[in-house]
Image: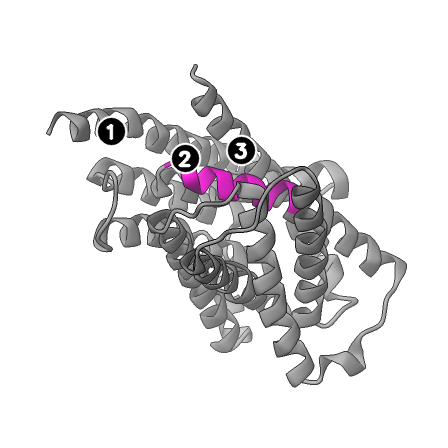
Amino acid sequence: MTPRKGGVLAAYMVVSLIWGSTYLAIRIGVSHLPPALFGAIRFLTAGSILLVLSLALGQRLPKRPRDWVTAAVVGIMLLGLGNGLVIWAEQSVESGTTAILVVTGALMMAAFDALIPGSEARPTWRQFAALFVGFGGVVLLVGGNPAALGEAGWLGPAAVVVAAASWSLGAIFSKRRPVNASPYVFSALQMLFGGGALAVTGLVSGEAAELTFTPSGFGAVLYLIVFGSIVAYTSYVYLLRHAAPAFVGTSVYVNTVVAVLLGWLVLSEHVSLRTFVAMAVILGSVVWVRRAEPARAHRAQEI
């Protein structure tokens, strides 16, 4: 295994495992803090810490204006809209239904990569088939409740779909616009721009009056700052630079598997044979997408 392949797989595991554990932290945090300012505190703090550490270790800020524009656009699309809308929607949409809607982002990312000009190696029909199989596995795993959509109205589910689309488009935009900055500096700038957008949203909507800190809320924010943002988001930025979007998108499938396993191990939530069958289907689809990459890249080099 080459160092780059090893780094891609390591980053994928970090994103899959840590972000799978953040569902619980977000659920706790949003029950104690207003959604937009909850996200703003998380990303502004994490971005500031990561930027200071990066600069102290000799990393440099981007010099080109286009790199700052890229950081702002990607930060707002992934974190401001993508993450912010999911946090807001979880106040009215069941977690299982939210998970199903979120993982549509994997399909969207592959579709956008195929449709938007500039792809290094467009997804194949086999990868799309694998993504649909994985999506079916997620539906089987979380057991989405159609009635929950009606109970939540249309705003909550629509917000999650918009969030998934925004995240996917932002990821493709980042892939198409390489920057002259380290993944750490680029991640920090994205967090600052995304967190800034959430802060403005929260303040304008009057969330400051609802802002109170509790031990549980503080613990959730601290976990998300250190692990969800500094560790996992930086790994995600690295992953976008070195892996195909179709494969990167499958990390949301594994996130769901990890979330269910943690619920079983930590909260003694019920699992059944269907659960493990669904996990096998999901992980099989991820392997299928990943194995399709080398052959596709090889054919692209021969043309």
Image spot of residue 294 (x, y percent):
28, 25
Whether residue 175 is visible: yes
Please give left or right for residue 195 compared with residue 288 in the image. Answer: right
Residue 278, above or below 148: above
Q: Earlier in the sequence, mark 3 or mark 2?
A: 3
Most distant residue in the top direction = 1
Between the C-alphas of marks 3 and 1, the distance is 20 Å
Q: Which amino acid does label 1 sit on?
A: Ala
Please give left or right for residue 106 compared with residue 46 in the image. Answer: left
Task: Residue at 51%, 51% (x, y): give it.
Answer: 62
Please give the label number shown on residue 242: 2
Task: Residue at 53%, 59% (x, y): give it.
Answer: 98
Mark 3 near mark 2, Cβ–Cβ under 8 Å?
Answer: yes
Label 2 crowd bin: few (<14), some (14–19), many (20+), radius 10 Å: some
Whether residue 260 is visible: no
Q: Which amino acid does label 3 sit on?
A: Ala
Image spot of residue 97 (x, y percent):
52, 59
Whether residue 162 is in magenta: the answer is no
Name which quarter of the figure residue 108 lies in. Answer: bottom left
Q: Which of marks 3 and 1 is nearer the N terminus?
A: 3
Q: What stretch is highlighted in magenta?
A: 230-243
Task: Residue at 24%, 55% (x, y): give it.
Answer: 116
In the picture of the structure, the residue carrying the numbered disc 1 is 297
Most distant residue in the front direction = 63
Q: Earlier in the sequence, mark 2 or mark 1?
A: 2
Q: Which amino acid does label 2 sit on?
A: His
Image spot of residue 81 (x, y percent):
51, 67
The residue closer to the viewer here, 279 or 90, is 90
Q: What element carries label 3?
A: helix
Please give the label number shown on residue 11: 3
Task: Residue at 55%, 74% (x, y): give it.
Answer: 151
